[in-house]
Amino acid sequence: MIQFRLDRRLGVSTYLQIVHQVRHAVRLGILRPGDQLPTVKEVVGSLAINPNTVQKAYRELEHDGLVEGRPGLGTFVAPTAGGPPPSSHALLRRSLERWLRGAFDAGLDAEDVRALFETSMHDLQKEGVA
Amino acid sequence: MNWLTWRQHRAQFLFGAATLAVITLFLVPSGLGIWHTFRSTGLAGCLAVTGRDCGDLASTFSDRYTGLQFTIPLFMILPALLGVFWGAPLVAREIEQGTHRLAWTQGLTRLRWMSTKVVTLVLATLAGAAVFAFLLSWWSRPFVAASDNRFSFGVFDLRGIVPVAYALFALAAGVAAGALIRRTVAAMGATLGAYVAVRTGIELWARPHYEAARTISYSFFGSGPHPGSGDWVLSTRTVDRAGHLLGNGQSLDFNVLHARCPDLPGPSSGFVSKAPIQACIQRLGIHLQATYQPGNRYWLFQGIESAIFVGLALGLLAFAVWWVRRKVA
Amino acid sequence: MTTPAALTATALGKRYRGHWGLRDCSLEIPAGRISALVGPNGAGKTTLLHLATGLLAPTAGTIETLGRTPGEDPDLLPRIGFMAQDVPLYRSFRVREMLEFGRRTNPGRWDAELAQGRMDRASIDLDQRAGTLSGGQRAQVALALALAKRPELLLLDEPLAALDPLARREFLKALMEGAVDGEVTVVLSSHLLTDLERVCDHLVVLSGGRTQVAGDIEGLLEAHRVLTGPRRDVDRIEGVAAVVQQATTDRQSTLLVRTDGPIIDPAWSVHRVDLEELVLGYLGQPNATALPAPRLARTGAEVSR
């Protein structure tokens, strides 16, 4: 089972953070098909957040086909859900490292890189790509 | 709700019960002693025969127990304490501590909360005051018989049924003051003040007029109305035949007498013998006039006074319940 | 939205000796929400909650709680849980006795298991006197009392004010768990905007006894933006419905705006707002309001009555 955490500095709404964290966990294989997500009560009991927020996140995940709700039992990762093959991970990671090296060579420091990354991420999210 | 009433007020109940126990421990043994003396000195037997003069026996008996008179003011204040310590904090303490917002937002209505508490306190008050009044009536009966004064201050007020009515009134005044003032200490003070004021007012200005007083005339050298029957003499005046007032009480100014009976020796002539004065009094028709409430009205007066205080108490309690339900928060 | 309202105030007013605690206040809190009631001291939050429970009676206008008139309907009280400001408890009672108090004064509704469970979770000794509890423990006991009567509407007046951050978090966890269990509508008044942002999905801002902002939090955040740009006169910006607040230096203008469409003017850079910015922006400008349009449903409801 996974544990959610909230980052207020992201400026991303709580329900989206939950959605992202589930997607991420499925993608990385931390959550496998058939695994149960924490119940709404468990989530609100550990994060002190609005239950409607959790329900909304789970509904959205369900709508995307990533999880399925079984009445009376809970919410489970759908059998069809699964991350992209690990090879693509390795590939992307290598290209990111290349890009980072280029950035450091150009005189950016870690702070600059992070800011750049987050701005780009933010813009892409706004466009609805990520 | 009864559980809550008990839990919240048990300290007050226990303190009240302890007070009553202390009073009982004082009254019963001393009362037994008083009754023993009353019988063994022959006073009881003497008083049982109407018309006999038991004056000496009675004054010996009364003198022996004058020391106990200090208890009278203590007993007079007891009902007021009930209002101060049971009544005033009922609503005031709740509001002072903010817990009314807890108590009045549970599943039971404020009306239910208030009426349960009030009814419980009223029942406890009635029970306690009844025991108190009964004991005190028994304890003081020999004194009352000996002094023939059951209407007097400190006697009428402590015997019969009126102490119960006073206690009820004090409780109600406390509850109402607490609801209105919302501060425990201030409400306690107001309760005490109101109790003393109302009791004094009724005692001085209302009680003598519950029934039209009777008037009786009798010889200047005679004695007052119906000794031994417990009459309550409100006033005695010395008047002449035409009814003109010559003095309050049994008193005559010699100068007045001299002016109307010129044959009397003047005030400067020293010793005047009794006979000419008596003759003068006789000639002028000087006599005494007493207004009084007959002794057989005692229970009527107890009833009227109790009804007044019970009526006041019910009015105050109804007001307090209404006020709490409608106005307080 | 067609959910019935848990709380409806219409032109509600409450006059105290010499001043109005609440005046001409209209609002609607939909059922099933967790609503934040915020505003400066003296804005009328406590007055509103006391009117909703029937502790106070209105001087003007009407208030309906769960469709009933508080203070007059004896069937309403059992359905409301209320936690008053400063968390009043009977100081001389043991915790066990406080729970007994709840059981006795809520006949037929009391969930003893829930109350006991909450005390276990919070590790509170049942034999401890209420007067010796810490602020966090008091709040937990009061919350257990309010939840164990199984209310449909839970009204909390500044429950977080006296709590340290840890106790605050524990309290909110307990509250949220209770909200899941009971499917209860919650109205929570508080100053602590950051805590509210996590737990609440509906917002009411009171100011000077009136409703200044009311609505779904996500919708409100979506509808507001902060614009920054070079200083210039602001008369009409495409996509801006109203300027809530503006601050200008000699070079730059910063605006909090309510939008009615995308802002495409390239002269402005557009930022999202968080709840704190939004609320403070409005409280700084008492004349600005953001209220839902009067619902047609209300006339319909009156006709059907």
Image (cartoon, helix red, strand yellow):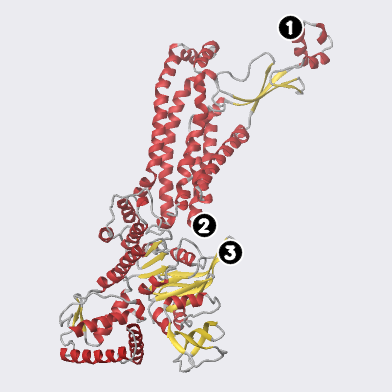
How far apart marks 2 and 3 lie (CA) works out to: 17 Å
Label 2 crowd bin: few (<14), some (14–19), many (20+), radius 10 Å: some
Relative depth, front residue between C65 and B249:
C65
Which numbered circle lies on residue B274? 1
Which numbered circle lies on residue B327? 2
Q: Is residue B117 above or below residue B25?
A: below
Q: Nearer the viewer, mark 1 or mark 2?
A: 2
**Picture coordinates of residue B307, whole percent (x, y):** 52, 39
Chain letter belonging to callout 2: B
Q: Do the residues indicated by labels 2 and 3 lie within the same chain of the protein?
A: no
Q: How many marks?
A: 3
Q: Is residue A23 above or below residue B302?
A: below
Quarter of the rendering containing residue C232? bottom right
C299 left or right of C104 in image: right
Relative depth, front residue between A72 and B159:
A72
C119 left or right of C222 in image: left
Amino acid on which disc 1 is placed: Lys
Amino acid on which disc 3 is placed: His
Residue placed under numbered mark 3 in the picture: C19
**Picture coordinates of residue A10, whole percent (x, y):** 35, 80
Callouts 1 and 3 close, C-beta under 8 Å: no
State whether residue B209 appears in this view.
yes
**Picture coordinates of residue B314, whole percent (x, y):** 50, 45
Label 3 crowd bin: few (<14), some (14–19), many (20+), radius 10 Å: few
How far apart marks 1 and 2 lie (CA) works out to: 74 Å
State whether residue C33 appears in this view.
no
Chain letter belonging to callout 3: C
A114 left or right of B244 in image: left
Q: Secondary structure at mark 2?
A: loop
